[in-house]
Amino acid sequence: MAFDRQNNKKEKTEELVEKLVHVNRVAKTVKGGRTMSFAAIVVVGDGKGRVGFGSGKAAEVPEAVVKATNEAKKNMVRIPLREGRTLHHDVAGRFGAGKVVLRTAPAGTGVIAGGSMRAVFEALGVQDVVAKSLGSNNPYNMIKATFNALESINSPRMVAAKRGKKVGDIVSRREYAATGKMEKEEA
């Protein structure tokens, strides 16, 4: 059985999408001069609704990326997606001075997002979304603001469970809001 578990772990790590978002060179001034190190931020996802991010710092870039990737794998969260391709509803997120607005999009739109947010959506598996970053363009704040927005998304199933209703009631109201009329009124 131990052999099977190892194979399962290898398969899980192979299917993860890793995106290097940013590498920053950091200089520390010490008695003998400056010591250089590198800080990396990485986004990891399975392309099916799970995504995480991490940052790592080391003397060499590859070491920093490995540290960031390991942290990202530990911090993965599940995000509900509509039809496996877009978000359930429009949402805004904020972290520090970084603000983001994420909007659902019809099929075929693609990922319209800049820089750090694009890496998050590609790792998450979102195919259609429109996103705008406002305020700070610092990659750390943009990613944290994007995760803040994504974690506040509720699927119809989650809303129905909270309110004690059926999923059909919640989805039919969404259709009512989009079209402006209910099926009962037509009859």
Image (cartoon, rainbow, N blue to C red):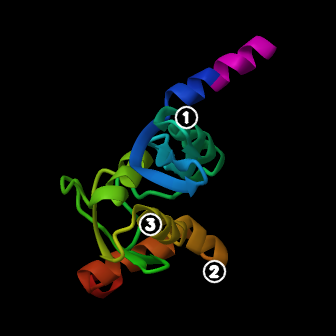
Q: Is residue 48 above or below residue 121?
A: above
Residue 184 figure quarter: bottom left
The residue under label 2 is 163
Q: Amino acid at mark 1?
A: Glu
Q: Residue at x 37, y 74 (%)?
A: 100
Q: Residue at x 66, y 17 (%)?
A: 7
Q: Find numbered disc 2 in the image and state the secondary structure of the residue it sits on.
A: helix
Residue furthest out toward the right: 1
Q: Residue at x 60, y 76 (%)?
A: 165
State yes or no: residue 30 in magenta: no
Q: Which mark is residue 63?
A: 1
- Mark 3 or mark 1: name the one nearer the start of the chain: 1
Q: CA distance from mark 3 to mark 1?
A: 26 Å
Q: Find numbered disc 1 in the image and state the secondary structure of the residue it sits on.
A: helix
Any part of residue 1 in sight: no
The residue under label 3 is 146
Q: Amino acid at mark 2?
A: Arg
Residue 174 spot, x, y in % from top left? 38, 76
Residue 151 figure quarter: bottom right
Q: Which mark is residue 73?
A: none
State the quadrant of the C terminus: bottom left
Residue furthest out toward the front: 32
Q: CA distance from mark 1 to mark 2?
A: 47 Å
